[in-house]
Structure formats: structure tokens, C-alpha cells
Image (cartoon, rainbow, N blue to C red):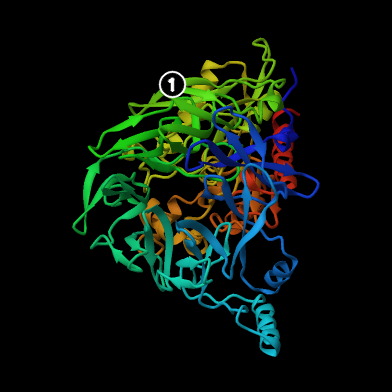
Amino acid sequence: MENVKLRDFLDYKFLSGIEFSSDGKYAAFVVHSMDYEDNTYLSNIWIMNCSTSECKKLTGMGKEQSFLWLDRNTLLFPSLRDEKIKKKTEEGENWTVYYAIDIHGGEASEYMRIPRKVSGLKKLTDGKFLMTAEYDHCGIDLSSCDGAERQKAIERIKENKDYEVLDEIPFWSNGKGFTNKKRNRLYLFDRETKEIVPISGPYENVSITGVRDGKALYVSQDYRDKMELTDMLYLYDSRSGKAARLLEKDDLSIAFAEFVGDEIVFAASPMDSYGLNQNADFYKVKSGKAELLCRHDFGMGNSVGTDCRFGGGAGHRVWKDCLYFISTEDRSSFIKKLSLDGKIEKLTDDNGSVDCFDISNGNIMFIGLRGTKLQEIYACDKGTEIQKTDFNEKTVQNKIVVRPEKLEFENDGIPLEGFVLKPANYDENKRYPGILDIHGGPKTVYGEIFNHEMQFWANEGYFVFYCNPRGSDGRGDEFADIRGKYGTIDYQDLMKFTDLVLEKVPQIDKCRIGVTGGSYGGFMTNWMIGHTDRFRCAVSQRSISNWISKFGTTDIGYYFNADQIQSTPWDNVEKMWFHSPVKYADQAVTPTLFIHSNEDYRCWLAEGLQMFTALKYHGVDARLCMFRGENHELSRSGKPRHRVRRLEEMTNWFDKYLKN
């Protein structure tokens, strides 16, 4: 057996977006792989014959990241293949071109071109599509310009790239860049006439959540100066061409809505007891009001963390009179079934993560990480999971994959759990260094699934240990609620876990342990080095150091900070400062590496720079590695070369202080 090596993740395959054909005979999905030389990801559409499980690659350009079924034999996917269109987009025009391809063979042919930057497309009726596309209030439309007028417009576009004008919050978004006065607007597109009819208003941000019989449900936020957290729910009817607001009040944060039987069912949170992280319950629309269908005190969607995913997919589906959805409970995510009587039933095993799924004629297929395997496609047949693909089997079949061992403990009378990875080729007579790894969120979870960097460190001779402290997902609102408590009870849980691990595993050298984490885990890493000297070194990734500065600089700062810290710079600046790790930087003695990206608009670069400067100012060994062109998702979807360099930097830092 071979050790897991640092660059092995370059060979992993990542699966996303599984969806059945209308007759259920085939399933389409996307396979992503890394191209280290060109420093990019290659994405192609694949087809599975559901009766034989045979899979074949349908596209080969390496740029096909999404698709939709046009009919049971044909897929549509967006791609820029026409050189004239490419040139127009380079000049500043917005175009999205869709190609059609027969799943049984043949070349893709252009099906339609839309003069918009399309973000989502749903077939409504034959020849008519609902789409969401960017609407830029400050943009310049080149599609209607010719000659000298067009050239002047191109020059204005070039000039506008030199500056940004901001007049609303949020003004940027992680992974999207500056978003000021840009909206995701809803349109009706007629393929035959090429007519584009706006449905939502010019200041609305919209997401389509359900389509049936020429009707569509969509969730909308309408704002000018400051985006709020509540949503409006609309029903669009293509026959009348009108959209009707379904709820009289806009006092809910709506996750999604669907047509279920004769009802409109939606998942939403009133945010009245536990703030913006409050779990969503299920409601029906009744006479303009939200009628509670059932409570659901677990996470909506999959929040089980790993660095071995790329791409997305559906987290909810409808079949017959039931809603199916993904939910995180304890350390795993599940597919659950909700019936119209309010009953919820689990359909998958407590065995890792379900990343996306589809259902047809009662048959469920999902993409997930099960046990310590990498992503594959599974069928869920009467409670039994059957693996249908082997995209990653050969990649790790000769590798030493360490199975996490669970440790249960209590703090403040609350049951908690964590996990320990032993070093590969573990010898109980030897002493080893250890790394505490803290997840982000904080409302996410670590489970028992494959995580490359953890497996790599275990194969490099480290114990790796991690847990789900208070604030994590999967245990209900009360457990996840650490508003106004950051750095207190969660810190105590993590340190109690560390004490337990060192007690239960005497093979870990107490003098050679390090700590790392990203986002919330980066906050906690920064917090720890200002409150304890027991870690020999630390690696703080995409971190938070100052809640006051973060309030006014990040895409979620003005509402996330106020909610989670229960204060603002004006009503209680002392509390925000109390929970800021940089306040305690003068007490830090732990050598710390900071990993940050210059386009991280979730935890902006200034957060890492402040903590780095503070340590340097106080004479503590510190290093900051900044990645240009990357954002908050560096560790999960950053460019291949950057992901390699990041893991090299981290491992070298740990080796320097924990092995040498």
C-alpha cells in the first residue's frame, strides 16, 4: 500500500449535478478533473444508462459545467464555441449560447443564443424558457449599438474598468466580485421570436425554485440601498403572463418553494428565535399566509465539510405528492421525504454526505461521499444503497486511507463528539505530533468522510483530530446558537476535546501539537493563539481577526457580524472588540502562518493582514501567504497550482515546528 501524497488530489474526479431524463432511463451528470499544467478544471457531461449502469462521456471540450434536459433524448448546455461570439464577449457584450446534443451520439449543434449573461435556465413550455440573468443598472448594452456608437461604447466599458462606484450594501460578493446595482433578474425567453420579457423588477434578486405546468415559483429580494434578509415568494403563470405575490408579509427567509400535489410547500425561517442561522421549517401557502406544515430542527442542505467536492446540484426534488430534500443531522447528511401530512422520513444511511440527487418513478440516485470513499454515484433502493460508478476507486485503492475513530465526551453537561485519525503505519510504541483541525461556518460539521489534507497529514506521520463544538450544524438551533458567545463556550469545547485526545492517546507528543482552521476555524485559530500557548504552531486560513473592521468590509459583514456577535460598532463596540482575536494578539507567542486570498470578500484580506501585523509587531514568528485571483473557496475550488502551494505551505510550517 502507498501513502497518500500531497498531489494525489490532482487525480481525483469530482461529480456534480445528477439529473434523470423524463422517462427515467438515463441520468446525466458532470465530471470535473484538474489540469495542473493549464491551472484549471476540466468539466464534461456524462450519461448513465440506468438499467445497465454503463457510463459514457458525452462532451469533450472540458468547459461544460451545467446542463438541462430538453426532452428525454436531448440535453442543452451553455458553451462559447463561436469565435465571433467570443470576440463580442471580450469586447463587453453579454451572450449565452446553448448547444443541443443527442445522448445517443452525434455532435452538439447550436440551439439558441441569448444576449444576456444567463445564470439559470428552466424549460417552461415548448420553445419558451424561464431564465435568470444579470441586470446591471450601470452597465452598457453593446448588443444594440453599431458603427461609431458601438466603438464609443466599447471605449466607455474599458474606461469603467478602472474604477467602481458604490451606493449600496452589499457591494461585492465572494466569488462574484463587485455586485453593486447588479441583480439576478427573471425573464421569459421565446426561442422562436427571440423576445426577452422581464418578469421581475429591475431591483429584484431572484431564484427560480419550482416549475410545473407552465407555472413557476420564485423567491425574490427587492432592495435599493441595503439588502435585507427576508424574501418574497411569487407565482408566475405563463398563460396570463403575470406574476402574483403569494405571501402578504415578507418576514421570512425562504430557502426554496415547490409544487407538491395541490399545495405550494416552502422551507423558510422566521429568524425570530435564533437569528440568521435558525433552521428552516416547512410551510404551506394558504390565503396569502404561511401555514406551518411541520417543524424541522436540523440543517437544510448538506454542510458536511470536505475538500473533495467541485460543482453543485439539486438539494430538493418533488415526486408524486412528496417533497424530497437533503438535510444535515449529526455528522452526516441525508435524503429525507416530506409528505403533505407533515411526516418526515429518512431514506439514506448515516454514512457520510449526500451532495445532490434526483428522483424518477420512485428511483433515487445521488452523488455523495460514503464512508471513506471519494465521490461516486449511488442508487437508493428500498433503503439499500448501491454504488453505481467507480470514478475514484482506482485512484485510492492502493492508498493507505485512515479511518476516523470517534471520541464521545461532555462539556457543561452537553454530549459532544470528535474524531481522531491515527498516523499511517501507526506504531503504538512511538510518539507522534498532532494537528487540531477546526471546521468553518460555524454552522457546518465534520464527519467521517474523506478529507484529502487530513488523510495526507495522517500519511505524513501526524495524528489529526477534529470535533463539532457548540455552534456546529446537525444538532438543532439551540446547539448551533453561539450568538454573542464566540470564543467562549466553543473555545471551551475545543480545548476540552484536545485534553481528551491527549489523555486517550498518549502516543501524541503534548509538546508537538499544532492547530489550523479556515473561516470560522481561522477565527478560532486566531483566538486560540491569544488565549493559550499549548500549541507549538498554528496555521490560520481565510480568518477573522477583527469583528469591527469585518462589519464594514465583507459581503456579509453588516448583517452576519451584527447577528452573530449581537452588537454593532455603534451600540456596543466594546463587545465586538472583546470577541476580536486581534485584541489578544499581544499575548500570543505561537508561530503562525496565515493563508489568505486577495479576492476573499467573505473574510477580507485585511483580516489576515491585521493579525499577521500584530504578531510581527509583538515579535512572534509569522508568515502570510497571499493568493492572487483566489477567494474564500481556495481550499475547495481554487486553481490546482494554488491548492498545491497552499498545502505545501501549511505542511512545511507544521513540519518546521512539529517535526524538526
Give the residue drawn at x 71%, y 22%. Answer: 399
Give the residue drawn at x 41%, y 30%. Answer: 330
Nearer to me, 527 or 171: 171
Q: Is residue 343 above or below residue 211?
A: above
The extreme top residue here reads 429
Residue 588 in the image: x percent, y percent? 58, 43
Residue 538 in the image: x percent, y percent? 62, 39
Location of residue 573 by image quarter: bottom left
Nearer to me, 523 or 359: 359
Residue that numbered label 1 is attached to: 408
Q: Is residue 84 above or below residue 74?
A: below
Q: Is residue 567 above or below residue 411?
A: below
Position of the N terminus, as image quadrant, is top right
Q: Residues within 10 Å of mark 1 (few under 14, many from 20)?
A: few
Give the residue drawn at x 67%, y 12%. Answer: 427
Give the residue drawn at x 74%, y 29%. Answer: 5
Residue 239 in the image: x percent, y percent? 34, 65
Q: Is residue 565 visible?
A: no
| Amino acid type shown at disc 1 | Glu
